[in-house]
Image: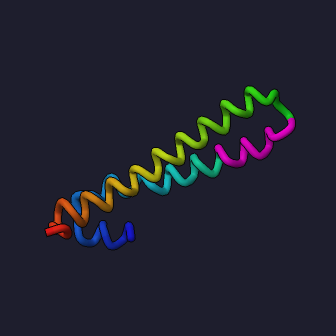
Amino acid sequence: MVDQVAGEAPRLVHAIAFLPDEHVALREQISAAIEHLGAVEPSDMRTEIADLLRALVRHRQHGSDLVHEGFVVDLGALD
């Protein structure tokens, strides 16, 4: 889907380039959370998981925004 957006809306290529960096950061956060399971206080774990969930929601929104910009705004897909 992202490759298709880049092909149809080249102006979004710069924004798309950040998605893999977000994947790396998310994997690191997930790995850290797994490592900390049982090793930190529950309140600290709760905070770490909440931070991870916020990062996942932001990443999902970035992808949704790109699809919207590429298909709806540029191509008028809803017309």
The range drawn in magenta is: 29-38
Say which residue appears at 81% left-offset and 41% top-offset. 37
Say which residue appears at 32% left-offset and 57% top-offset. 66
Q: Nearer the viewer, residue 51 or 79?
A: 79
In the picture, measured across the screen, residue 21 lies left or right of residue 74, that is: right
In the picture, measured across the screen, residue 10 lies left or right of residue 48, that is: left
Query: Which residue extends farthest front?
Result: 79
Quadrant position of residue 42: top right
- Specify whether residue 40 is painted magenta: no
Quadrant housing the N terminus:
bottom left
Where 52 falls versus 73 (above or below)?
above
In the picture, measured across the screen, residue 4 lies left or right of residue 49, that is: left
Quadrant housing the C terminus:
bottom left
Say which residue appears at 32% left-offset and 73% top-offset. 4
Name the spot of residue 49 as percent of width and height, x first: 66, 39
Query: Which residue extends farthest right?
Result: 38
Name the spot of residue 69 as percent of width and height, x first: 25, 58
Where 67 falls versus 62 (above or below)?
below
Magenta stretch, overall SS:
helix
